[in-house]
Amino acid sequence: MNIAIIEDEMPALQKLKTQLGQLGHYKLVYHSEEPAAFLSAFRQHQVDLLFLDINLPGLNGVELSKQLRNAGFKGQIVFTTAYSEFAVDAFTLGATDYLLKPYTNERLALALSRVAAHRTPDPEQLMLTSKVGDKVTRIEAGRIEVIKLEHGHAIAYTSESTYPIDSSLEELMATLPDTFIRVHRNAIVNRLKIITLERWVTGGYLLGFAHSGLQVISSRSGARLLRKKLQI
């Protein structure tokens, strides 16, 4: 994957380059502290992913991303900043992720996994069926953050609601795409929806999710699987 970095703080640039080297094989094809320079030069480089600081001299990262899209830039953008207040603007502009400095290797690995998922063409979206009484609801699997076993029944959590699923977790794992991970005997998670991982006293991870507000604790074996899948 070809990567460009726009960052005006040399320590932050060097740290990101080191982290990328530790996490996988990525090719840095461009880096600069001048946003306007990349706006002029991006067509000369085949950039798959741009790490873009927001607080930049002359032209901030949010405005640069707008101009890049208008100029035909097709790569994905991950914002890196110490300021959380720009997150809504970033995702409105179609950013793949938003990293708050200082970020760990684990958080960077999550961002890279989201980038990889966006680069892979999706097959026809898998639909799950939820039935409550006479009402049947079809749910896109990609909208699901967590599926938990509660009182013997599988419950799917999305950002806006919960849905009972008449299948076992084993049956669901046999049909769900590989973005889903069985992290505990009672829980399946969508790795693209994880926003935080915290080491837990039991040897697993405490996982936080993007929109549902759920927290899930993985088992030790689930933690090993997470590290493998997320390359952390």
Image: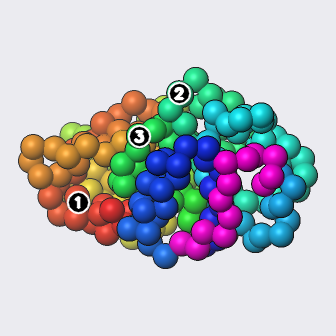
Image coordinates for residue 214, horizontal then vertical, percent: 35, 34
Image coordinates for residue 156, horizontal then vertical, percent: 41, 44
Task: State the residue position of label 3.
Answer: 102
- The CA span between labels 3 and 1 is 26 Å
Towards the viewer: 120 or 22: 22
Sooner in the amino-acid sequence: mark 3 or mark 2:
2
Q: Is residue 129 above or below residue 74?
A: above
Residue 28 lies within the magenta run: yes
Mark 3 element type: loop
Q: Is residue 24 visible?
A: yes
Q: Residue furthest top?
A: 85
The amino acid type found where label 1 is placed reads Gly
The amino acid type found where label 3 is placed reads Pro
Asked if the residues shown at circle 3 and circle 2 are in contact, with their CB atoms under 8 angstroms apart, the answer is no
Residue occupying the point 54% across, 72% down: 26
Few, some or many residues within 10 Å of mark 3 (<14, 14–19, 20+): few
